[in-house]
Amino acid sequence: MKKIALFPGTFDPITVGHVNILERALPLFDEIIIGVGHNSTKSTLFPVETRVEWIKNIYKNEPKVKATFYEGLTVKYCDEIGAQYIIRGIRNMADFDYEKNIAQMNKIIYPQAETVFLMCDPAYTPISSSVVRDLIRNGGKASEFVPKEVIF
């Protein structure tokens, strides 16, 4: 059976930390779908189409990676695409506490999917999309925190 994983997030914008997690996940799965999700609690800076396009450009030479947009429950999307795994990146204990609760709820709602936590490399611990968005909004230099394909 093909091991399909969903890597969900808003990716607004995708950062080098996200790329670090995905590179480390690649050997573990046959296919990884990066699901750019709509999160009603987050105020996004970039249109979803732009975010999906950036990801497609970053992984254009990696046949195991696809990028899509989805709305609604992540586990419902897992069911739609046949994903048995959900990839979540962890930078610190606060991330773990937050993600653990979501993973446990997802397991109750959709037991067919297993959440896989991957710690980012220490160099990427301070990098988050929200910090990068703040840099961009306030005229700071954010290019070192995003892949070269992310143009704003």
Image (cartoon, rainbow, N blue to C red):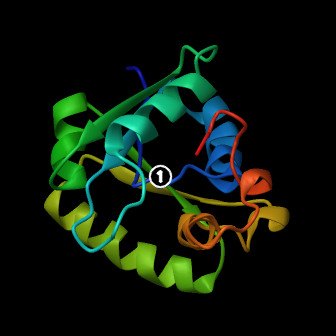
x and y, in percent, of residue 47 in the image: 35, 46
The answer to which of 5 and 67 lies nearer the viewer is 67
- SS state under label 1: loop
The x, y position of residue 12, in whole percent, is 47, 55
Q: Residue at x 67, y 67 (%)?
A: 139
Q: Nearer the viewer, residue 41 or 105?
A: 41
Q: Where does residue 69 sit, x and y in percent of width and height?
A: 29, 38
Q: Residues within 10 Å of mark 1 (few under 14, many from 20)?
A: many
Is residue 80 toward the left or the right of residue 1 in the image? left
Res. 95 image quadrant:
bottom right
State the quadrant of the N terminus.
Answer: top left
Does any portion of residue 48 appear in the rendered image? yes
Which amino acid, mark 1?
A: Phe
At x 42%, y 59%, the residue is 45
Compared to residue 59, the image places residue 121 above or below, namely below
Against 100, is 61 above or below? above
- Compared to residue 98, the image places residue 45 above or below, namely above
Q: Is residue 138 left or right of residue 13?
A: right
Residue denoted by label 1:
11
| Image location of residue 114, percent across then percent down | 37, 52
- The quadrant in which residue 67 appears is top left
- Name the residue at the right extreme: 123
Q: How many marks?
A: 1
Q: Look at 65% across and 49% down and name the residue there.
A: 21
Viewer can see residue 111: no
